[in-house]
Image (cartoon, rainbow, N blue to C red):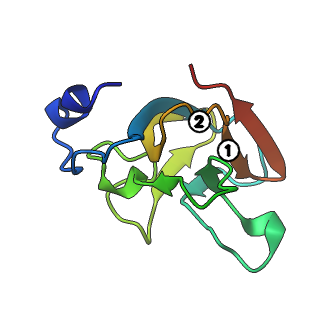
Amino acid sequence: MEYQQILSQGTQLPVPEQGKEYILVTVKVTYENGDLETLNFYENYPASWAAARVHFNIPNENSNTEDVTRQLPNCIWGPDEFEGRTILKGESITGDVAFLRDVGNTEPLYFVGYNQVIEFQIH
C-alpha cells in the first residue's frame, strides 16, 4: 500500500526513510470454537510462556522490521492495548496490522497464538 493511502486512513506514520516501506494488511479473525463463550483477543508478546504468546510478526533477522500496528486507527488489537477486543463464540472481528520493513523484503507475515502458527504471503 502506498504511503499516501495509509495517510488517507487517518494514520500518523512518518514518511518511510529511503529503502524502507510500510505494509498494511487487513485481517479477519473468527472465534469458531473453544471452552470460553467470550474470547479476549489481545496482543501478548513477549510472554514468558511461549504457549501464551499472541501476536503478528515478520521475521526480524537483521533487526530491520518494525511493528507499527498500534499506530493504526483500525488496529486489530483494538483501541486499548491492555484490554484488547472481545469476540463471542461464532463472531468475527476485522482490523489492520502494519510493519515498516526494508524494500524488497519477501518474508511472510505470521500470526502466532492459541498453539497455532499461520503464515501469510505478502505480495
Identify the residue shown where x is 23% and y is 26%.
Answer: 5
- Residue furthest to the top in view is 123
Residue 79 in picture, x, y percent from top left: 32, 57
Up/down of 85 relative to 3, above or below: below
Which one is closest to the eye, mark 2 or mark 1? 2
Depth check, front residue: 10 or 36: 10
- Residue furthest to the bottom in view is 48
Depth check, front residue: 103 or 56: 103
Residue 94 in picture, x, y percent from top left: 45, 33
Instruction: Please state if 7 lies on the left or on the right of 34 as rendered.
Output: left
The C terminus sits in image quarter: top right
Depth check, front residue: 91 or 98: 98
Amino acid on which disc 1 is placed: Phe
Identify the residue shown where x is 65% and y is 55%.
Answer: 60
**Nearer the N terminus, badge 2 or badge 1?**
2
Identify the residue shown where x is 56% and y is 44%.
Answer: 88
What's the mark number on residue 111? 1
What's the mark number on residue 32? none
Quarter of the image for residue 50 reads bottom right
Residue underneath mark 2:
105
Instruction: Please state if 36 lies on the left or on the right of 74 as rendered.
Output: right
Identify the residue shown where x is 48% and y is 55%.
Answer: 67
Quarter of the image for residue 18 reads top left
Q: CA distance from mark 2 to mark 1?
A: 18 Å
Amino acid on which disc 2 is placed: Asn
Residue 38 in view of the camera: no
Mark 2 nearby-residue class (10 Å; few <14, some 14–19, many ≥20)? few
